[in-house]
Amino acid sequence: MYAKVLQVGYKARSAARRTVDPGTDEFADRALRFSRNPLGIIALFIVLIYGLAALVTTFASSLSSGERLPLIYFLIIFPVLILGVFAWLVSRHSNKLFAPSDFKDESNYVKVLSATASLAVASAQKDQNPSADDIRTIVSAVRESTRTTGQIAEAPYWRHHLLWVDDNPQFNTYERSAFEAIGLDVSISLSTDDALEKLESQRFAAIISDMGRREGPKEGYVLLDALRRHGNQTPFFIYTSSNALDHKLETLERGGQGCTAEAQDLFRMVMRAVVSR
């Protein structure tokens, strides 16, 4: 008996659907798709408010001209106001306007979140109060990288393999996690000799090194000089606690590609080098 009731209910619902105007059905489907992300909800809200105001103004013949005037002003000012609010949202909160399904590959959404979170924590470890500008810079760096990782996804393994030389790898865990979140593998060397040994048998897309190690206060330069002497032109970046200009210039003079103390700068420089190889 219960099954028959369900069958009758299903047939009635199907019949009701067939009698619905196709245009209405299409509008409902589009509205459902729009409602899946914040930007779509804003668009639906705008259409609803503006449509209601237009209907009231058109069909409210009982209103006097003075009563219609506020509605007319609203219809004129509302689009300008929405444009201003929309521009503010896009410029300040663009990362919050999209849902995972808006990405061509939803896994990219997870990559962006994971890499951004890792870089934010890495920056916070060095600066206990990263500014809003710092966070926007981090998001920008991650977005830039995720747009280009597809170019190396099917490349030889070395194209997405980094060598990180540091005798205290526990201090850059989050920086490494950011690279790993977008699909790069990171191998660790604890010394200059170990790094040179790895480089004799393996190829890497880029090398990241600290400056001072147990071997000496400028082991980053020692490793860089040794590589360039042997003709190894792998992109080389020094990640250190100093952001001094003379350190940056000396790194470039010795044949390196960059020197920084900022996690987001390192991420951006390394990703550009990886993609360009």
Image (cartoon, rainbow, N blue to C red):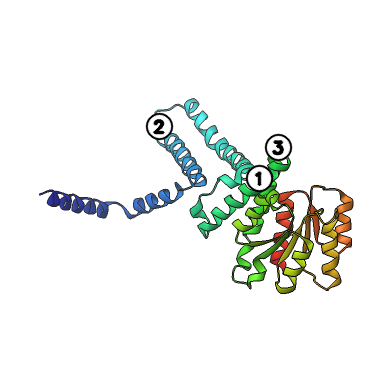
Q: Which mark is residue 120?
A: 1
Measured along the vertical axis of the image, is residue 254 above or below residue 89? Answer: below
The spot of residue 270 in percent (x, y) is 72, 60
Q: Nearer the viewer, mark 2 or mark 1?
A: 1
- Secondary structure at numbered mark 2: loop
Q: Position of residue 134 (x, y in %)?
A: 71, 43
Residue shown at the point (52%, 60%) measured from the top left = 105
The answer to whether 102 appears left or right of 126 in the picture is: left
Mark 1: which secondary structure?
Answer: helix
Q: Secondary structure at mark 3?
A: loop
Q: Does residue 30 appear left or right of residue 264 in this picture?
A: left
* Badge 3 density bin: few <14, some 14–19, many ≥20, Cα 10 Å: few
Name the kind of residue labelled 1 in the image: Ala
Residue 264 in picture, x, y percent from top left? 71, 50
- The residue closer to the viewer here, 152 or 98, is 152
What residue lies at 78% left-to-right and 59% top-to-bottom?
237
Tell me if label 3 and label 1 are in contact, CB under 8 Å.
no
Residue depicted at x 35% and y 50%: 24
Q: Residue furthest front?
A: 214
Farthest-out residue, left: 1
**Which residue does the image show at 70% across and 65% down from the upper left?**
274
Q: Which residue is mark 3?
A: 128
Query: Please, what is the three-letter code of the amino acid marked with disc 3?
Result: Gln
Residue occupied by mark 2: 61
Quarter of the rendering occupied by the C terminus: bottom right
As measured in the structure, the alpha-carbon distance from the residue carrying label 3 to the one carrying label 2 is 63 Å
- Counting residues from the N terminus, which is met first, the one under dot 2 or under dot 1? 2
Q: Earlier in the sequence, mark 3 or mark 1?
A: 1
Pick whichever, 134 or 260, lies toward us. 260
Q: Which labelled disc corresponds to residue 43? A: none
Mark 2 Cα within 10 Å, few/some/many (few <14, many 20+)? few
